[in-house]
Amino acid sequence: MRAAALLLLLAAAGCNRTPSSSSAPVASGFGVAIVGISGEKQTAGAGATLDQPVVAQVNDAQGTGVAGALVQFSSMDGAHFDPPSGLTGSDGQFSTTVRLGGASGRTSLVATTQDKSGKRVQVTFAEIALDYQQTLGQVLNEKYCSRCHNSESTAERVSNHDNLSVAPHAFSDGATLNQISRANLVAIITHGGAALSKSPEMPPYSPTLSASDIEALTAYIRAVADPPYRPQGVFNANP
Amino acid sequence: MTEKIRTAWKFLFGDSARAFGSLSVVLVVMLAVVPAKDHFREWLHYQHEYQSLIRNRSDGVSLARRFQGGVQQIWLPELDVVDRCATCHSGLKEASLAGVAAQPFRPHPPIPHSLTEFGCVMCHRGQGFATTVEDAHSSTKAWEQAILPARYVESSCGQCHERPLEGTPQLNAGRDMLARYGCVHCHKIASPEGRVMTATDDPPSLAHVAEKTTREWIFAWIKNPQAYATTATMPNFQLSDEDARDISAFLINQSTPYIAGAPRKTPAVPKQDDTAAVQQGSSVYGESFCASCHAMQNAAGLMTGGNIGPELTRVGSKVKPEWLADWLRNPKVYDPETAMPHYRFEEKDVGLVMGFLGSKTDSDFLKDVHMDTATAAQIAHGKTLVSERGCASCHEINGVAHADNFAPELTAVGSLPLAKILFAPGMAHTVPDYISAKIRNPRSFGNALKMPKFTLSDSQVDSLVTALLAQTTRAKTLPATLRIQAAPPSTYQPAGRAGQLMTDMRCFSCHEINGRGGSMAPELTWEGSSVQRGWLVSFLKRPNTLRPTLIRRMPKFNMTDEEASVLADYIMTVYQTAAFDGAAKFAGGDSAHGKDLYYGKYACNSCHILDPAKDKGYIGPTLTEVGLRLNPEWIFHWLKNAQALRPGTLEVNWNMNDEDARAITAFLMEQKAAPRKGASR
C-alpha cells in the first residue's frame, strides 16, 4: 500500500517535471497560403541560436496577410522553436526564434497553417548549421574573403566587389562553385586566380593562410552553396 | 487446487529420475540467461544496425573491413579518459558516411585533433565508460555528467586553449564579455596556472559624482540603465523606488569636489534653439571623430559609433555643463584613469561641442523623477544598500571599501557538482542549464540574491555560458604540455616626455605597441621603420585618412608643433624593427617594370587606389603619396612578408621574389602626388 502511494507520488512529481504543453491557441483567422518572409538561409554553429528570427506570413486568396491564423513550426532536424506555435499578428505574420539542432548540415524548418476546411498548407525554410571546420571557414571568410566576394555593403564594411574588373563569385553561388572540384578550389585560393588562368585580382593566399585554413574555407564554401553541394560519385573511404 | 499442485509435483519430482530430469531443465534455462542477456545488449543491437546500414552501400566492403565488433574503448590514462562511445558510434571515422543523418552512425565532422588521441568526453562530456545510451548521455542516478549540448561544445576547446582560437568565435566572445561586462569585478575567474582574469570595462569612479550629474539622473539610471542607453553594460539591480532613492541620496552625499577652490568658468555655450551653432558643434564632434569611440542613435534610430566610450544619445539629460566643460578640456582632471584622450580643444570648440551634446536630451527620461531632500536615515540606508549590493566592487565610492571576492569564485564553475546546486523548480538538472538560467534571470533563484540582471541576447548568453563551462576541474589536471597559454598582459610604457604625451592622448586606447593597447587602429610597434618623419609629423598634426571607407578614424588632437616633433622623434628612434639587415637589397629596382607588376601580375589596384582617376580598390590604404609616407626598405620587406612586420594584417603574404619586390618598391617610391581634393575628409 505504502509502495503504491510512493509510486503515485513519484508519478505526480514526474508529471510536474515535464513542461506542461501549453494548450495551442485557437485560430480566429484562416488563410489559404503561407509564405516565408525572412530568416531563411542563415548560418550558425550547430546547436546555436539563429541571429534573426524566422518569420512566416499567412495570406488569403488575394495575397494579403490574415490576422489570428495559427502557425506551427516543426523540424525533422532537431531545431527548437521559441515559441513553437502561435497566432499571426495584425500584419498576418508570425515570428519565432530558432535554435538549430545539434548536428551540422542543412536544417529545414516547416511552418504549417490550416485553411478553413482544415487542409494543411506549409512553407519550408532552409537554414545551415556549421561544424567546427566550417565555422573556422566562416571566420576566415569574414576576415579575408567577404570584402570582395560579398557584394553587400554596410556602413561598417564597404564592399570592394564592384571595384573589380571581374566580379568575384558569392560563396553562396552554388550553380557556379559546385562545378569547381575541391582540388581546384584549393588551388585557386592557394595560388591565386592567375595560376589557373583566372583573374589576377584574386591573390594567392598561401602562405598567408595555412593548408588547413584553406581546407576550412572550402568546407565553408561547400556548406553555404545554394543550390546545395552534392558530392559526385562514390567516396574513397578513409584509411 | 491443492490436488492439482500435488499431481504436478508428483509428475515432476515423483521419483529420482523425474527429479533429475526436471532439475536439468531448470539448470539449462538458468545457464541460458547469461548469453541471452548478452545478446540483448543495447550496443550489440546498434552494431547489428550499423552492419545492415553498410551492407548495401557501394563502399560497404571497405567499411565492413574496418568495422570491429565488441566493446570499443579508448583508454588514455594521462588524460583520465576511458571512452567506449565508439562501441555504438561505429562510423565516427568514416568520412564516406557524411550523408548519413541517423545517430549513432554519423561520422565525426573534421576537427584538428585526432579522436583516438583525445577521446570523446574531453569535448562532449558524458560518461565515457557507460555502455547504455541512458548512462552515457544523461545524468542518471549513478552518474552526474550529462552530454554537453552542441551549442556549448566550444567551451571544451577552452580547457587547454587559453589563447583565442580562430575557430571558436563563441568561446572568444564569451571570454571577452566576462571581462567587458565586468563579471570579473565580483567573481574571481582564474586560469589553471592561476592567472586571474581582469576586467576591460572601466566603471567610472563615483567619488565626485555629484559634480557630474544630478540625483534625479542617478535615480533613473540605477532603476534601469538600459532606459537611458540601450548599449549600457551596467546591469539592472531591480531596485525598488525607495532603495533607488536612498542609494542616490548616499551617492550624492559621499561625493567630494574634484577641483578645489574658485568657481569654474564655462565657455560660451550656444543656445539650444540656435540650430546653426548646434550644427557647428555637430561638425566639431564629427571632425574630432568622437564617434570612433562613442555611439549615438541617429535620426533614423540606428546606433552608429564605437563602443569604447559610453553611448551619448541622451547625454544632455545627464551631465552638468560645468563638469562637461572640464571634461572636454582635460578628462584626466576628473578621472585620471579614463580611456578618453586629452583633446587640446580651443575654448570656442569646447563651447560648440557642449552645445551639440546639450541638445542630445530626452525629455521623457527624467519626466517623472522628483526627489525630496534626503534625510539622514535615507542616506545611512543608502550606504548599507551600496555595501550589500557590491557597488564598490566596480565603482570607487567614498567610505565604502572595495570588496574582494564579493561573489562566488567561478574558476571551476564548469564542473560544479550537481549535488551542490540548488535548482529552481521546473528547470533541467544540468550545469549548463543552471548557468544559463542564472545569467538570464538571477532572481529566479530567490529574491534575496544579489546578482543583478544583465540585458543580453540569446546568443550572448550562450557565449557567456560557453566561456564559463570552459572553467573545469579537468582543465587543471590535464598535462601542462597540452596547455596553450594566453599571452601575458603587457605592462609596456614608453619613457620620457613622449611617454607622457602618449599617455595624455591615450594612444593605447586604440593602438597596440609592444603587446599593450587596443585593436581599433594599426599596430605601431615598428612604426619608426615604416614611415618617413616628415609625413609622420604632418599626420600627427592633421590626421588625414589613409583608407577610403574607414569610419573609425584617428582624431585630431590639436597638438603643438613641439609636441608633434617630440612624438615623431620618439617613434622614429624607438619603434624600429631589428629585422631589416641594412643591406640595400631594396634599392635599384626598375620602376617601369614595377608598374607592370603592380597593375598586372599582382593586381595591387584591386585593393589600393594609386591613381584616383582610374583605381577603385577600397580595402588597403591609398597609395597616391606613398613615396612621401613610407620607407622603401619597409615596402620591400612588406611585399616579401607583411605578416612578419605586422601580424594579422589583411595584406596578403606575397612571398615575393627580390627582383619583383625591388621593382614595385621603386615604382611606389615615385608616387608623391598631393592627395586629391577632399580625400582628407
Image: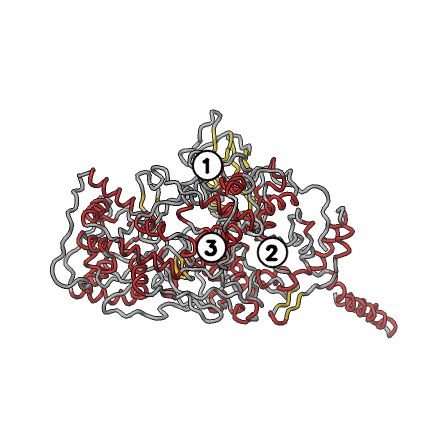
Task: For residue B240, say whether it is visible.
Answer: yes
Check contact, mark 3 vs mark 2: CB within 8 A: no
Q: In this view, does A129 lie above or below B193?
A: above
Q: In this view, does B576 lie above or below A186?
A: below
Q: Which colour style is shown?
A: secondary structure
| Residue B111 disc label | 2
CA distance separating discs 3 and 2: 21 Å
Quarter of image, res B676 = top left
Check contact, mark 3 vs mark 1: CB within 8 A: no
| Kind of residue at disc 3 | Asp
Task: For residue A125, say whether it is visible.
Answer: no
- What quarter of the picture does the N terminus of chain A occupy? bottom right
**A138 left or right of B458 in image:** right
Q: Which residue lies furthest to the front in this view?
A: B588
User: What kind of element bears circle 3?
Assistant: helix
Residue B277: percent from the left, percent from the top? Answer: 20, 40
| Kind of residue at disc 2 | Ile
Task: Name the residue that disc number 3 marks.
Answer: B462
User: What kind of element bears circle 2?
Assistant: loop
- Of circles 3 and 2, the one toward us is 2
| Chain of the residue under label 2 | B
Residue B211: percent from the left, percent from the top? Answer: 19, 58
**B605 left or right of B549 in image:** right
Residue B196: percent from the left, percent from the top? Answer: 42, 68
Q: Earlier in the sequence, mark 3 or mark 1?
A: 3
- Of circles 3 and 1, the one toward us is 1
* Front one among B233 and B532: B532
Check contact, mark 2 vs mark 1: CB within 8 A: no
CA distance separating discs 2 and 1: 41 Å
* Front one among B482 and A74: B482
Q: Residue furthest top?
A: A62
| Residue B615 disc label | 1
